[in-house]
Image (cartoon, helix red, strand yellow):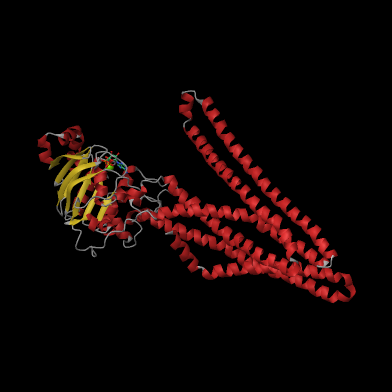
């Protein structure tokens, strides 16, 4: 949770935070001293001859204070820049590690752009809030305390109250103006985003627009969007000048009142001329804090909103809430898979992606799954690795309900080569061992030999150490598939799933690869999902999926004799199959 992240970061950095605040305090306190010294010197000027020595001493004090302030400022400036970055980093780290452990079904409800904005905008908003609080907030508070105290203590209570009243008014006014300014700023940001998206879309669709002669409409819409950007920016500018104007007027008022009442006090002999001048210097110390107040509050508010949004992300259920009923994975995941009356629809969708699926596979067997696009093949595979939740006793592995098998153990024991064969922008080696160190180069080489891509990889400039996506190293669909398949040859899990991973291979390569896979899965449970008969015809069992239902099942021979859907696929692919027999 956010509170824990913030609390831990504070704990880790408590000395830095203390030093930072302490030095800000020292800084502000020391800032009040020159005013006093200047006032003192001025009073001494009446008798310059006899006071010469004291005046010089005090001037030296002034210079030393100046130098001292530079050092103090350096220290806290360093910390106020450093600390918010630490908070930002910790929040981002926790957010990312949380995100990767969220249930896929929950993650699916959020758009990609939305997720990005958590990492970019919200985290930055929180950093800005923290920065403003420790840099400006502390200075505001210390100034209020130390300077007001010095004014009352060293000079005069009434004069202080009179002089500070306009400043309080300034603070309230700027707060209200700032609120309006922020609102318009937000509108300006949003309309600018809208405008950029519109430009992007229009240029992308330029051919279509020209084809139906829609330029004028597009331009008209653009002008109105652009007008909105102008209006909101204009308002921001107006409010911004109002802000500084309001501060100037109130300070002018404060100085004016001080002049009137202060000079009267001087004439009455209540305060000295030096004190009067010192008082004016004190007022000047308020300029910064009064103008910062509204900003600190607005940044704090933004930060709080971002905080709540991130908190809502961190509250999303994690996957690893599994009961740890099973500790050791040695004994469990031999590959008997039993699927009983399994139906499934994607969260938020009414249509069933799978209905009433029954499959029984024994350790060592190979199951072929065939079916048209969208028939539910990948959905079934995703459920086997718990990417989405299923009810109890729907899927059992080795006699255990998968709900009782901790997700990490389950996934460690099932080698699932997915359909999307996504590759990271990393080296080929890392793409194959998936960033685990337990395999050496020889293991990797053996696995790419098995997946029939050895020669192609060895011809690349840095062979298995070539970085994908860098300097024009790009791979064909079939190469990507075989690299993904190499992962299966590295893995020693008892269950191996290939989801449509041979679609981009030519017949010859495919047959060689299937032979190697056959060796690999000799004692393992293997599921091959494919649209091609040639990939699955040797399987011990084949199921035919159609629209989420198993419409046929049996061996290749049985299914051909049944003369149903499978046979139809077969006939459609007959030419291809004959080819592969010839090879
Ligand atoms: N993440 C998802 N959210 C909602 N519906 C989905 C999701 N993924 C798939 N579907 C739907 O579920 C059905 C089955 O999809 P699935 O990906 O399992 O088909 P498939 O048999 O693997 O198809 P293909 O041969 O194209 O890989 C389809 O109607 C699809 O639109
Ligand atoms: Mg699929």
Report if residue 505 is visible in the image.
no
The quadrant in which residue 537 appears is top left
Q: Is residue 407 left or right of residue 307?
A: left
Q: Is residue 292 left or right of residue 41?
A: left
Q: Is residue 102 left or right of residue 17?
A: left
Q: Is residue 555 above or below residue 406?
A: above
Quadrant where the N terminus sits is bottom left
Pick the front one: 77 or 392:
392
Quadrant where the C terminus sits is top left
Q: Is residue 312 left or right of residue 483?
A: right
Give the percent coordinates (x, y) of residue 119: 46, 52
Give the percent coordinates (x, y) of residue 144: 66, 63
Q: Is residue 264 above or below residue 353?
A: below
Pick the front one: 524 or 63:
63
Give the percent coordinates (x, y) of residue 97: 39, 57
View quadrant of ligand 2: top left
Pick the front one: 146 or 385:
146
Report if residue 510 is visible in the image.
yes
Total numbered badges shown on the rendered structure: 0
Q: Is residue 438 above or below residue 103?
A: below
Pick the front one: 314 or 47:
47
Residue in the image at 51% along x and 38% along y? 194
Residue in the image at 63% along x and 40% along y? 234
The quadrant in which residue 15 appears is bottom right
Give the percent coordinates (x, y) of residue 122: 49, 52
């Amino acid at each position: 949770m956010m509170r824990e992240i913030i609390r831990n970061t504070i704990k880790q950095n408590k000395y830095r935070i203390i030093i930072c605040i302490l030095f800000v305090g020292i800084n502000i306190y020391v800032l009040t001293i020159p005013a006093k010294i200047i006032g003192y010197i001025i009073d001494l000027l009446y008798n310059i001859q006899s006071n010469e020595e004291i005046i010089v001493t005090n001037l030296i004090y002034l210079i030393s204070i100046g130098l001292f302030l530079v050092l103090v400022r350096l220290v806290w400036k360093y910390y106020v820049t450093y600390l918010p970055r630490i908070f930002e980093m910790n929040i981002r780290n926790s957010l990312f590690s949380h995100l990767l452990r969220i249930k896929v079904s929950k993650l699916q409800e959020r758009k990609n752009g939305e997720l990005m904005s958590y990492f970019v905008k919200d985290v930055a908003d929180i950093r800005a809030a923290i920065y403003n609080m420790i840099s400006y907030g502390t200075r505001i508070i210390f100034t209020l305390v130390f300077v007001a105290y010095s004014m009352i203590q060293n000079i005069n209570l009434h004069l202080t109250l009179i002089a500070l009243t306009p400043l309080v008014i300034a603070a309230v006014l700027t707060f209200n103006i700032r609120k309006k300014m922020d609102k318009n700023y937000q509108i300006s940001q949003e309309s600018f985003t809208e405008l950029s998206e519109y430009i992007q879309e229009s240029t992308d669709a330029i051919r279509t627009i020209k084809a139906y002669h829609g330029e004028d409409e597009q331009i008209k819409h653009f002008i109105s969007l652009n007008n909105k950007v102008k209006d909101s920016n204009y308002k921001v500018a107006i409010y911004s000048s109002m802000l500084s104007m309001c501060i100037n007027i109130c300070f002018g008022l404060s100085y004016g009142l001080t002049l009137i009442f202060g000079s009267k006090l001087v004439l009455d002999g209540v305060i000295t001329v030096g004190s009067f001048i010192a008082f004016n210097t004190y007022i000047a110390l308020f300029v910064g804090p009064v103008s910062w107040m509204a900003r600190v509050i607005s940044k704090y508010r933004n930060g709080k909103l971002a905080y709540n949004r991130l908190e809502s992300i961190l509250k999303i259920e994690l996957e690893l809430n599994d009961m740890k009923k099973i500790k050791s994975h040695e004994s469990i995941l031999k590959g008997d898979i039993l699927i009983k009356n399994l139906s499934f629809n994607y969260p938020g969708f009414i249509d069933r992606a799978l209905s009433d699926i029954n499959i029984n596979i024994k350790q060592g067997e190979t199951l072929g799954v065939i079916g048209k696009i969208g028939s539910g093949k990948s959905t079934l595979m995703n459920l086997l690795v718990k990417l989405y939740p299923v009810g109890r006793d729907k899927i059992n592995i080795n006699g255990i309900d998968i709900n009782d098998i901790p997700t990490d153990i389950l996934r460690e024991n099932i080698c699932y080569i997915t359909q999307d064969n996504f590759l990271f922008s990393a080296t080929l080696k890392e793409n194959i061992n998936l960033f685990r160190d337990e395999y050496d180069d020889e293991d990797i080489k053996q696995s790419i030999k098995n997946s029939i891509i050895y020669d192609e990889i060895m011809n690349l400039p840095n062979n298995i150490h070539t970085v994908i996506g860098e300097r024009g190293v790009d791979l064909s669909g079939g190469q990507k598939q075989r690299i993904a398949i190499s992962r299966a040859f590295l893995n020693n899990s008892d269950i191996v799933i290939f989801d449509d991973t041979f679609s981009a291979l030519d017949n010859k390569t495919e047959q060689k690869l299937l032979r190697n896979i056959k060796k690999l899965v000799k004692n393992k449970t293997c599921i091959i999902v494919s649209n091609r008969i040639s990939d699955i015809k040797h399987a011990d069992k084949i199921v035919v999926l159609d629209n989420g239902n198993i419409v046929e099942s049996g061996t290749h021979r049985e299914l051909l004799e049944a003369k149903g859907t499978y046979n139809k696929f077969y006939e459609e692919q007959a030419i291809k199959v004959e080819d592969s027999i010839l090879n």
